Image (cartoon, rainbow, N blue to C red):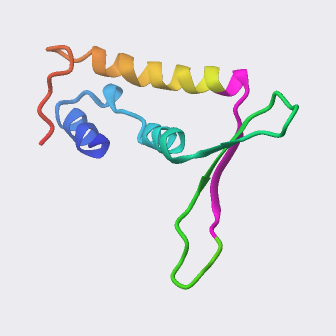
Amino acid sequence: MIDRFNKKMAAVARADLKIDPTIADLRDVLVHGRVLGAVGSPSLWIFKFGRPAANQSSVTTVFASEMSEEWFTAQMQRVETENKKVGQLPGRGNVRIS
């Protein structure tokens, strides 16, 4: 959907409103990631694992990060930046992207 939206923005000469496609990766990590922490430690880490290959019992780590206050702040700023772009659209984001 982001790719279609970005193509639409380029077609109407609003490339400045293109959405960062990596924002979907953040959503994927938050929805499908695993949060781990050590007993007695205030630190939490989030991991996202890839799919196992056929006949494999192991997976690869595709994302790992400490979920620090700085990390959350940076991610919230990223989301806010992309939301503001959509909010700048005429009709408040009611753009047909099909």
Q: Is residue 96 above or below residue 57?
A: above
**Quadrant hosting residue 46:** top right
Q: Depth check: give the residue in front, 6 or 14.
A: 6
* x, y percent for residue 19: 37, 33
> Residue at the location (70% across, 41% down)?
65
Position of residue 81 measured from the top left corner of the image (x, y, whole percent) = 45, 20
Q: Is residue 27 above or below residue 63?
A: above
Q: Nearer the viewer, residue 71 or 37?
A: 37
Residue 60 magenta-highlighted: yes
Q: Is residue 23 left or right of residue 57?
A: left
- Asked which quadrant contains residue 4, the reply is top left
Q: Is 1 on the left-hand or right-hand side of 57?
A: left
Q: Position of residue 70 (x, y in %)?
A: 71, 22
Please state if 63 lies on the left or on the right of 98 as rendered: right
Residue for point 29% across, 21% down: 86
Residue extent of the magenta highlight: 59-71
Relative to 58, residue 95 above or below: above
Q: Nearer the viewer, residue 34 or 85?
A: 34
> On the picture, is 64 further left or further right than 55?
right
Indicate the position of residue 35 as horizontal and vertical percent values. Answer: 66, 41
Asked whether residue 14 is drawn in magenta, I would say no
**Residue located farthest toward the right when viewing the structure as drawn:** 40
State the quadrant of the C terminus: top left
